Amino acid sequence: YPAYAAALDWNGLGFLITMGTVMLTQGLRKVPIHSTRRSAGGGNTYGMQQTYMPLRVNYTGVMPIIFAGPLIQFPAVLLSKIPAEITWLSGLKWLGGQLVDMTSPIHLSAYALLIMFFSFFWVATQFNAMQISDNLKRDGSYVPGIRPGRATAEYLDALMTRVTLIGGIGLLIIAL
């Protein structure tokens, strides 16, 4: 019976990890968008369309994990190769050994910091709030309660920062 219970616990953990991964991948923050339709003649508005802009919770996918792993391992291996005869570098050799050991708190902390850093770095390089704001303004669309232009860009940037924080923490939990 204990072996069966242990297997059940591992299956439950696998189910929870799979469920969390799917939720993180499919998660969206829907930003409401109102757009006015214009008639062909005279530019008079004759209707309004309501839709939303989906912001993915995990905008980065697995890129932070892909970048963080090798970025830890490369200096870790170099530091662990320091000869034992060089005593004044023994602290760096110890740090390299800690970074190579995937169960050490130093490795896990550095891995977590790199995953969070690359989550925000990827969003900062790929998500252009000003361009999205300009496209919305050009198409006659707007976010309700937010002025078109710079205010919309600042709103989208702040919203994407919060969404990225949630997505980065979720990615971090799954990775660790």
Image: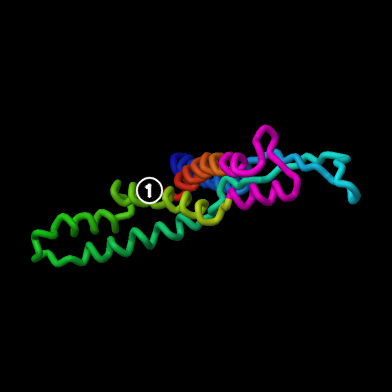
Q: Kindly give the residue lying farthest to the top in the view shown.
A: 145
* Among the 4 quarters of the image, the one containing residue 44: top right
Whether residue 127 is situated above or below residue 9 in the rendered picture: below
Looking at this view, is 17 or 133 the one in front?
133
Task: Say which residue appears at 72% left-offset and 50% top-offset.
Answer: 138
Residue 128 seen in the current view: yes
Residue 16 seen in the current view: no
Residue bearing the label numbered 1: 113
> How dense is the environment of label 1, judged by Cα within 10 Å: few (below 14), some, or many (20 and up)?
some
Q: Is residue 147 magenta?
A: yes
Considering the numbered disc 1 on the image, is that residue within a helix, a strand or a loop?
helix
The magenta-colored residue range is 129-155
Q: Position of residue 173 (x, y in %)?
A: 46, 44
Amino acid type, callout 1: Leu
Q: Kindly give the residue lying farthest to the front in the view shown.
A: 42
Q: Position of residue 92 (x, y in %)?
A: 19, 57
Q: Position of residue 45 (x, y in %)?
A: 85, 41
Q: Is residue 132 magenta?
A: yes
| In this rendering, position of residue 76 left or right of residue 52 | left
| In this rendering, position of residue 25 left or right of residue 138 | left
Whether residue 8 is situated above or below residue 71 in the rendered picture: above
Q: Kindly give the residue lying farthest to the right in the view shown.
A: 41
Task: Say which residue appears at 61% left-offset and 47% top-offset.
Answer: 56
* Among the 4 quarters of the image, the one containing residue 46: top right
Looking at this view, is 16 or 114 the one in front?
114
Task: Say which residue appears at 43% left-offset and 60% top-offset.
Answer: 67
Q: Position of residue 122 (x, y in %)?
A: 50, 55
Looking at this view, is 15 or 96 the one in front?
96
The image's colour scheme reads rainbow
Looking at this view, is 67 or 158 the one in front?
158
Task: Say which residue appears at 48% left-offset and 46% top-offset.
Answer: 168
